[in-house]
């Protein structure tokens, strides 16, 4: 089985980092994985994004035309990806920074007030972890949250206990928010 | 008393670099709390003390050419021509 | 060594380091720059040479110089930069010094864009400069393969005193994938006999990329062609999957090849007997193997991220035995598995061995005209 | 009886030669400012309609979108050669090239030196931000000693990477160069001088006095990893001492032909 | 106009002048230099632009600039110099401005020598730079044809807004032959609408050799490919002699083609039904006509002054219908009529249509090893 | 009682670092002389066996045949880059590049300027004969004003072709250059000074003091269409006034590290 | 029928000029002709030579491996071309500057003391015209001497009566010498 | 009286450029009337007045390094060492 996830947002919102975390977790979990960023500082401005593909066999294309799962951290990302998500796909978006609701009926659109939640947790930079938590909740077959937590510790610069704890809370908070939002949606 | 001035900032063009604000001798420019469509917090003219002289320093420094500066001029000549 | 999640460009750089590269010279250009930046940090740490050249012309000629000293030297660049290296590459080929070039292709022509592309197949495989020569061209399709290929690249360069180009596109350069790095090789200490190391205790060495006399230059070229023939005989590499019973063979290199693999799997699930043939050496091209496959195959589909380049070599290899169709995307677009699958299905329906020329038009999705922006 | 009455005049505005298009430059990037100064000069000299621009490869590669004049994009570093070709067949047009420091001082060294040596009747605006902006902050020939960039992660080391290359001084030393000036854009006063220099450079061309070049010390907040404001301070305190400001050559003026 | 005895390089220059070239930019290199020197004298006399550039990089970019102004611009060079022009050529192709390049090939690779050669066929026909583009490539075989081709070159360049390369070797460049020059054409006065002439009374013109967005660049490339397809459809040119009843077709371009003509005549005198096929446009390659000829021919012999380049295009065109053999000389040697005749005789004996793959080894005379000088 | 007795000493001879091979240079061409001076210096400094030469494309393309040291031929103009590559991986070797004026001052402008800017530890011998010798006498950037060449048949016109480019002055202006000297070979006295400069240039490299370059005013009797003797007079009377002789930079000496 | 002639000598001996003269004459005579020099100042020193081919049909190769007619103006040219001349071919050489006699019995070797003859005519530069006269005498089917004389006047810078007269005498002198030498040989 | 000198010219290497002859202060070098194998008229040392001082100017100027110069030196030191 193959899962694909696009993380999209402003540069600085940590989308590349979130994607890498997922990639590490998948790798640790014994799966095939690719992480592919939009690249090149020759393109200034606009959104940054990355595509993570997780699979139990060799991965062909590291990019997808119609992603199954999209995490959109800002309004432009919602604008860009809403039309692209695969039918029946998942679009989790940061409702705190999105001015509109979705229009496509054939996808699962999940609003998460992630910026606010991050602010509540005391650090806006936790935004990406909150959204990651939401993803794990809603597309949970990708990898178990425990694997992601271990990956956080092993591969990312989050070995310090406080940081790790914060990130973990963010993941859990994301899961909880998603659980709620998913139920509503 | 110095001549009076005022500025108009094209807030959609503004990228919130704060350079205009930094250079205004009268602290007449502040950064907005809200975002423009591009996601920047644009500069706002807030000449609270009515001190803007139209010196144009802000406009001279604005990399986005987003500021128009008006300055009072004695009007007599103007009235005769138009 | 452990499996790590590695970014293509950086993994290539580290693999070169472990293969014992002595000197790196380069000039920034997207989507290759991480390679240079990695070297900027890593090489000085190891007491090896890193130098940002004034240009790609400078870089290729510095590499030429360092290689003349018998050191393992490399550079990396992307399409426009590689165009600037053509004269230097031709000199290096003529001088027969070993050099490794990593070419992370981007969209062309001109400044084009920085998106992944394979539109410089011809530039590397047919004409990497003026005159009759060919670099060995290795085309990895994954980060792991790129890592493995670096060691091979240096070894082949030394073995044949030739240019080895590692040809990839921005996808592989920018992608992260799990891969395992080889252990650090000890660096070569003794310089080869032909190298410029000073004529203190031996007669002088001269590295001369010319022969002004016609007879001499012809003799030289014949000898060069013999070397190329030897390489063509000994160094062909490719990857194939499910070709044994395949009726339709999909051919693609690098990124296009790995994407085609997904499409071939999808086709198999639909009951179409498709197989994947992915050349790893673009030169020498695996023509013999393809020609064998053509004995049985009903049709070939060549997938490239260009307007149709390697397809000519496939046609030459297939030699009219079966239809060879082409699917291409340009400008940074990737040919997606679904597109390839559709083409496979179409080919499956159209082609019979009896009628190798049955009409079957396969083209890259043509762009809606609204996207089109004319030059002015 | 005197009646005091005031009216309002516009004393600063977006120049006409500058397009309406929103720029892609990072916030606070002075490329936009340099564009505005050039556009103001084109307006003031009323030459927009006869001016042909050669844009570089670098962050200013989109400059064509920002100027209301005809333009072409040259290969990286070759703008002076492209400008030469344009000017030789269009002697009645005003041709200017816009180049970054990687473009002009590194890969394009030969082209700029020879355009100057021929006394080519073109104007070059040279944006020196001590770094390769577009490709993500690599070392440029004009990077300062000790400066950390993505390709000099331990700082520019004179021993292996040399000292900053002062292109304007080099070019001023070439007979064919008529007007060579280095200016900065770090505060309004300097910006006003920079504009004067740009104006003078175009006048040199209009008056058929030969080759003119204005180097503008600029910034790259993104790759310098500074706020725009910090970047201006950095130009002033770090770059200006290495790249002294002023007219390095003003030959036509010396010849008494035409002053600034 | 009267017939005169004209030197190839100078005749080409004068023909360009009469075709209305507005500006010439170049850099000295043997065996092309007389062309530049002729222009140095002639262009200023006529009040047109001549400029010796600082390098071939400078020259090609000056040509780019002049062409952007809507003027007829040209440059000329030889192999190493043309390698240096690859980036510029790719930009020009992307910018779609008309430019004429004369490439008087010499022996390679590297500095090689200055003797006549055809070893840059691939460089011009397959990859004149990075990215998917192709210049129109015209290959004259005599001074008269070179003269005639110059006018055509400028017209085609303008018509398709493309690069037209006139590809020849030192033989034709240096040779004197009787030829007739055309009358002087009036120079074009009105600039085309896309040219950079100042945006005083119209919206601005932008010549942009890039499209940063993937979709845009793909759309652009598709449009470019459409243009190339149109050229391929409309502009094929070749010369054939005695092919109507020919069983064996000798294929060669430029000097090799004209020498082959002598050999074909000799073969006919021996009763062998040989014919000559000489492509004049190397791109677009006359593949359709060759493929027609392959319907009846018993075999093809391709003669080139290189290690075998155009032979690939012949093989692609013939598509396995008949054997395609190759005779090549390198390093400045010419394939002499006798050598070619011997190969024709051999092919005549070996090849039957029934057995297209009957063994028949044809090679350039291999050099006695004493002539061989190793690199050091 | 004093007995007067004399013996014979060899006071001038063919240096050992020079090969026995007969040169291909035209009669009276000073390339051969420049070769001899270099070879003498290699002998005197006893560095022949550790010296690597980078030969140019130009009349000196065969220089490999004439020196008894290891060598490689660089593409036209790129000798400084090739030398850089060699030197960076062979810091214990002495690397020198030999370049003509077309090679160094025209096509190779960027490479020589950047080698100097990096303070590359190489020595460059620059043969300025004001013309492209090998390709048959075309104009070089160093051709004199009014000089007729095969590519400036009406004489070099400053307006369209610019003035002679003074590369040594340019290079002396670059921080990375340690020793830059221009000498001539038109008579024995000047030749002796030229040799001193060459020696100094190699010493700079031996002492790890940075980049060194010696420009030698030379001739091309064939393309100047003069007898060898006339060509020496022409150097003296026409070239020297345009290209003044002397040490243009002797930074290491100024630093008190080592005098000539 | 096709004739080929190689003119070879030191640079400055006028071999290229002589070849061009023959080419003009052939052209005026309505024949096909090619003139091909050894080229390139990149090759300093050594001999200069050119090949002229005259034919009544299109000319294929402008060069021949084994020339039928060779005019050798100096010793190195004799050394170079004696082994190359076609069987039965003609090698006319300047005996004044040649230190040896020919060794091949299967070619017609004709020594002409051309430098001396030129000196007698008062101008060493007439050497090439003397050899040309010899060629026309010995391989006379190429073009009649009258056509060459007209070509001299029409195409070469020899329109001045004295010069023309001198060149004509040289041609005639060459013919006479060849007639004599040919008879002896 | 000045020290005496003599020179030896490698006539096969000589290209007859005449530079040595032009520079000799004692006109001790003349050009030969005969040609060497390469076709050049080589320089000849013809020190008719016995004036050559071994100044080496000829050798310093010779582009072909074809001249070896000998000069007399007081012999005593020499005799003691060998
Ligand atoms: C031949 C070539 N080499 C390299 C590049 C990649 N490249 C694009 S812009 C650039 C440098 C830009 O730096 P600079 O000229 O200083 O302009 P800035 O972006 O700083 O304004 C480089 C190396 C290219 N496009 N073409
Ligand atoms: C890329 C390239 N361009 C041009 C040439 C032709 N070429 C060979 S040498 C030369 C110039 C030689 O002049 P210079 O450097 O002054 O040396 P000189 O012969 O005068 O000593 C040129 C243009 C070449 N070989 N390669
Ligand atoms: S015009 Fe002057 S005073 Fe007014 S806002 Fe701008 S900087 Fe301040
Ligand atoms: S300077 Fe311009 S862009 Fe920057 S904050 Fe002020 S108005 Fe906005
Ligand atoms: S990267 Fe630097 S130079 Fe480029 S736009 Fe951003 S700030 Fe400006
Ligand atoms: S052409 Fe000139 S530079 Fe070259 S060898 Fe002859 S005289 Fe010397
Ligand atoms: S050594 Fe001096 S005196 Fe003797 S021949 Fe030579 S130049 Fe004349
Ligand atoms: S200087 Fe040397 S080459 Fe010239 S004539 Fe004298 S000995 Fe001969
Ligand atoms: Mg910059
Ligand atoms: Mg020169």
Image: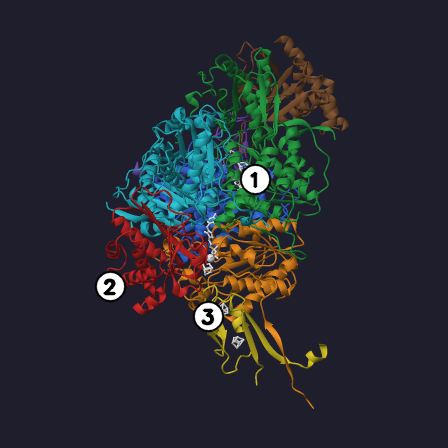
Chain colours: A red, B yellow, C cyan, D orange, E green, F blue, G brown, H purple
- The response on whether ligand 4 sits within 8 Å of label 3 is yes
Which chain contains the residue that carries disc 1?
Answer: E
Which chain contains the residue that carries disc 3?
Answer: B
Question: Share a chain, discs 3 and 2?
Answer: no
Q: Is residue F40 visible?
A: no
Regarding mark 1 in the picture, which secondary structure is present there?
Answer: helix
Q: Which mark is residue E226?
A: 1
Q: Is residue B1 visible?
A: yes
State which quadrant residue F36 falls in.
top left
Image position of E270 with respect to D81: above or below: above
Query: How far apart, in angstroms, are the residues tagged by discs 3 and 1?
Result: 49 Å
Image position of C7 with respect to G173: above or below: below
Which chain contains the residue that carries disc 2?
Answer: A
| Tag 3 near tag 2, CB within 8 Å | no
Residue under the point 58% across and 67% down? D14
- The response on whether ligand 1 sits within 8 Å of label 1 is no
Judge the density around disc 1: few (<14), some (14-19), many (≥20) Cα neighbours within 10 Å: few
Relative to residue F86, is residue H49 drawn left or right? right
Q: Which mark is residue B18?
A: 3
Task: Name the foreground residue: E353 vs C324.
Answer: C324
Q: Position of residue E64 (x, y in %)?
A: 58, 46
Image quarter where the N terminus of chain D lies is: bottom right
Task: Name the foreground residue: C114 vs G104.
Answer: C114
Total labels drawn: 3
Regarding mark 3 in the picture, which secondary structure is present there?
Answer: loop
Task: Name the foreground residue: D86 vs A41.
Answer: A41
Q: Which residue is mark 2?
A: A165
| Tag 1 near tag 2, CB within 8 Å | no
Judge the density around disc 3: few (<14), some (14-19), many (≥20) Cα neighbours within 10 Å: many
Image position of A89 with respect to G116: above or below: below
Q: Position of residue C314 (x, y in %)?
A: 44, 30
């Amino acid at each position: 089985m193959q899962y694909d996830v696009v993380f999209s947002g402003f540069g600085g919102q940590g989308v590349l980092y979130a994607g890498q975390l997922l990639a590490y977790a998948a790798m640790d979990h014994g799966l095939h994985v690719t992480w592919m960023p939009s690249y090149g500082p020759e393109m200034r401005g606009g959104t940054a994004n990355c595509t993570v593909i997780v699979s139990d066999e060799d991965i062909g294309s590291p990019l997808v035309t119609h992603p199954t799962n999209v995490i959109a951290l800002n309004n432009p990302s919602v604008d860009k990806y809403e039309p692209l998500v695969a039918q029946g796909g998942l679009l989790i978006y940061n409702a705190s920074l999105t001015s509109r609701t979705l229009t496509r009926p054939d996808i699962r659109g999940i609003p998460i007030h992630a910026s606010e939640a991050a602010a509540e947790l005391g650090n806006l930079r936790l935004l990406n972890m909150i959204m990651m938590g939401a993803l794990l909740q809603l597309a949970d077959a990708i990898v178990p949250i425990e694997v992601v937590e271990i990956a956080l510790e092993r591969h990312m610069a989050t070995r310090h206990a406080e940081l790790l704890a914060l990130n973990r809370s963010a993941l859990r908070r994301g899961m909880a928010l998603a659980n709620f939002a998913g139920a509503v949606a | 008393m110095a001549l009076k001035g005022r500025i108009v900032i094209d807030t959609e063009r503004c990228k919130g670099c704060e350079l205009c604000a930094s250079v205004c001798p009268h602290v007449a420019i502040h950064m907005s709390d809200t975002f423009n469509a591009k996601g920047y917090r644009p500069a706002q003219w807030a000449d609270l003390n009515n001190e803007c002289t139209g010196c144009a320093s802000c406009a001279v420094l604005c990399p986005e050419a987003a500021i128009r500066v008006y300055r009072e001029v004695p009007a007599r000549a103007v009235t005769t021509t138009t | 060594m452990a499996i790590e999640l590695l970014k293509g460009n950086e993994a290539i750089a580290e693999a070169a380091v472990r293969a014992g590269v002595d000197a790196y010279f380069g000039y920034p250009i997207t989507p290759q720059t991480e390679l240079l930046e990695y070297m900027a940090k890593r090489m000085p740490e190891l007491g090896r040479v890193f130098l940002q050249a004034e240009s790609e012309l400078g870089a290729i000629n510095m590499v030429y110089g360092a290689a003349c000293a018998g050191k393992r030297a490399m550079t990396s660049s992307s399409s426009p930069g590689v165009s600037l290296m053509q004269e230097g590459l031709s000199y290096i080929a003529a001088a027969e010094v070993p050099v490794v070039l990593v070419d992370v292709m981007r969209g062309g022509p001109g400044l084009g864009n920085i998106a992944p592309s394979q539109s410089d197949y011809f530039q590397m495989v047919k004409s990497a400069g003026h005159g009759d020569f060919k670099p060995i061209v290795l085309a990895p399709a994954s980060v792991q393969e790129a890592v493995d290929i670096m060691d091979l690249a240096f070894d082949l360069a030394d073995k044949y005193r030739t240019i080895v180009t590692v040809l990839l596109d921005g996808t592989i350069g920018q992608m992260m994938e799990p891969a395992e790095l080889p252990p650090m090789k000890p660096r070569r200490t003794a310089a080869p006999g032909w190298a410029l190391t000073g004529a203190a205790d031996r007669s002088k060495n001269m590295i001369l990329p010319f022969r002004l006399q016609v007879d001499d230059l012809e003799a030289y070229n014949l000898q060069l062609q013999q070397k190329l023939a030897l390489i063509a005989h000994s160094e062909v590499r490719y990857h194939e999957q499910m070709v044994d019973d395949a009726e339709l063979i999909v051919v693609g290199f690098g990124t296009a090849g790995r994407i085609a693999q997904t499409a071939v799997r999808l086709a198999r699930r639909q009951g179409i007997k498709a197989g994947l043939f992915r050349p790893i050496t673009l030169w020498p091209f695996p023509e013999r193997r393809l020609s064998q496959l053509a004995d049985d195959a009903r049709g070939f589909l060549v997938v490239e991220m260009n307007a149709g380049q390697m397809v000519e070599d496939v046609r030459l290899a297939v030699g009219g035995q079966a239809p060879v169709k082409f699917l291409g995307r340009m400008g940074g677009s990737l040919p997606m598995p679904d597109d390839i699958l559709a083409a496979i299905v179409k080919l499956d329906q159209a082609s019979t061995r009896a009628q190798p020329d049955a009409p079957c038009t396969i083209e890259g999705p043509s762009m809606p005209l609204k996207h089109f922006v004319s030059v002015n | 009886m005197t009646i005091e009455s005031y009216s309002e005049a516009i004393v600063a505005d977006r120049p006409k030669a500058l397009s309406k298009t929103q720029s892609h430059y990072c916030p606070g990037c002075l490329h936009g400012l340099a564009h505005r100064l050039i556009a103001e000069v084109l307006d003031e000299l009323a030459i927009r309609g006869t001016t042909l621009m050669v844009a570089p490869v670098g962050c200013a590669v989109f400059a064509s979108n920002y100027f209301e004049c005809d333009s072409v994009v040259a290969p990286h570093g070759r703008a002076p050669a492209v400008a030469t070709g344009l000017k030789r067949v269009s002697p009645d047009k005003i041709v200017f090239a816009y180049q970054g420091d990687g473009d002009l001082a590194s890969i394009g060294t030969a082209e700029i030196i020879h355009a100057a040596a021929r006394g080519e009747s073109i104007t070059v605006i040279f944006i020196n931000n001590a770094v390769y902006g577009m490709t993500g902050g690599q070392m440029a020939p004009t990077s300062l000693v000790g400066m950390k960039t993505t390709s000099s992660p331990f700082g520019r080391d004179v021993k292996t990477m040399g000292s900053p290359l002062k292109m304007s001084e080099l070019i001023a030393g070439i007979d064919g160069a008529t007007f060579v000036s280095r200016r900065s854009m770090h505060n309004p006063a300097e910006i006003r001088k920079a504009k004067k220099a740009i104006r003078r450079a175009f006048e040199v061309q209009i008056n058929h006095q030969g080759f003119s070049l204005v180097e503008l010390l600029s910034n790259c907040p993104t790759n310098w990893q500074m706020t725009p404001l910090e970047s201006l301070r950095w130009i002033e305190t770090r770059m200006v001492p290495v790249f002294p400001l002023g007219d390095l050559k003003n030959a036509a003026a010396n010849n008494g032909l035409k002053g600034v």
